[in-house]
Amino acid sequence: MAALWHGAARLQVLSFQPEAPPVFLLDAHHRGAEEPFAGCFDNRSVSFTTDFPSSNFLLAHRIHRALLVQISGHQPQPDLAHTLRCWQEARIAIDLKRLDIPGPPTPVFVERPSRFGWLWYRFWTLLGLKRNELGGFGGLIAEPGGG
């Protein structure tokens, strides 16, 4: 969060070309390791393949490589793995840059998420996360009312 806050000013002065490739940003803790408490922002969410461009769209726009940047780990988080696996099966190369290891990105083979895992993931998403009034996830946790 601090990097986003401090990096916003730097991004404002950069000049991006209209044909620059897209960037997608997911909070490393978006799946929520802890229950949020009253007064904080509930940032828990999940990503679905429909949240990203299809492999056909990317290939039609000459995008043949994706870079996954994460703090640690050899595989993407399970929700993102579904999307990256679809891209990979369409011959879009996936590279991984781990921030805990110096050096350049390396190719990664995204493991196929299990069918059971996919169903379990959908179930817990619907059960454990509450949608906000606009249909997405996230929002301030209300203070309990007195009564």
Image (cartoon, grey):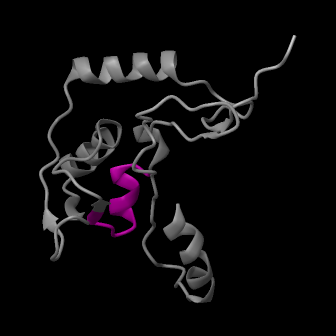
Total marks shown come to: 0
Magenta span has 116? no
The residue positioned 14% from the left and 40% from the top of the image is 111
Q: Is residue 11 left or right of residue 115?
A: right
Counting from the top left corner in percent of width and height, residue 42 is at 60, 37
143, 6: nearer the viewer: 143
Farthest-out residue, top: 147
Q: Look at the picture and state if 127 lies above or below 71.
A: above
117, 32: nearer the viewer: 32
- The span picked out in magenta is 53-67
Quarter holding residue 135 = top right
75, 135: nearer the viewer: 75
Counting from the top left corner in percent of width and height, residue 44 is at 51, 36
Q: Look at the picture and state if 37 lies above or below 19.
A: above
Q: Look at the picture and state if 118 lies above or below 79.
A: above
12, 119: nearer the viewer: 12
Counting from the top left corner in percent of width and height, residue 43 is at 56, 41
Quarter holding residue 122 = top left
Magenta span has 55? yes
Q: Is residue 63 left or right of residue 144?
A: left
The residue positioned 53% from the left and 84% from the top of the image is 16
